[in-house]
Image (cartoon, rainbow, N blue to C red):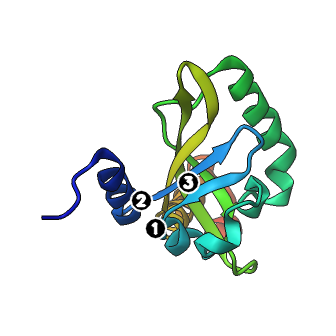
Amino acid sequence: MPDQSPNALARILLDQSPNAMVYADREGIFREWNAAATRVFGHGRDAVIGQNLDVIVPERFREAHWRGYDRALADGRTKYEGKSLPTRATHAEAERTLYVELSFGMAEDGGAIIGVIATARDITERFQHERDERARVRALEERVAVMETGGSSSEQARA
């Protein structure tokens, strides 16, 4: 019979989760990284364990990220707790655009905050589709506005 102890079961759940699951300690150092995180971010577990969160945080967001991270640790909660946050992330293939939906939670042990748990899923395709749809709707709204305001026929023809 397979090992059903709490530790063995926790390892199975982490390893086989369909969502990326990562854990970073109070200093923002990755201490856990599952197989789905490798699929989403492109980095193998051995490459990120011991590295800080900058591995997946785009450079332009790092300052704000670390302010929020430190504030969450100090407060013992994150303002995004229980919410999903769509954001840009860095993939191992630096030229690849990656959008993820992140959910965060504080990791506690004996009442003390020991780090942060996050889950992520790749939403790049959905994000790009929705962005394209918003652009299409804006273009249509502009065309309607030109027609409603009686724009010149050359303006209407270009629209």
At mark 2, the secondary structure is loop
The amino acid on which the numbered mark 1 sits, given as a three-letter code, is Ala
**Residue located beneath label 1 in the image:** 36
Within 10 Å of disc 2 (Cα), the crowding (few <14, some 14-19, many 20+) is many
Is 139 on the left-hand or right-hand side of 36?
Answer: right
Looking at numbered disc 3 in the image, what kind of residue is underneath it? Val
The tag earlier along the polypeptide, 2 or 1, is 2
Question: What residue is rendered at 38% in x and 57% in y?
Answer: 11
| 103 up-or-down from 93: above or below | above
- Are circles 2 and 3 on residues that touch, CB within 8 Å? no
Q: Please state which of residues 20 and 126 is positioned toward the viewer in this rendering.
A: 20
Give the residue pinned by disc 2.
19
Q: Quadrant of residue 90?
A: bottom right
Distance, label 3 to label 1, CA atoms, is 10 Å
Q: Position of residue 130 (x, y in %)?
A: 49, 60
Please name the amino acid that badge 2 sits on. Answer: Asn
The disc label shown at residue 66, or none: none
Secondary structure beneath label 1: helix
Nearest to the observer: residue 82 or residue 144: 82
Mark 1 nearby-residue class (10 Å; few <14, some 14–19, many ≥20): many
Circles 2 and 1 in contact, beta carbons < 8 Å: yes
* Residue at x 75%, y 77% (from the top left corner): 94
Foreground tag (2 vs 3): 3
Instruction: Give the secondary structure at mark 3.
Output: strand
Residue hosting label 3: 22
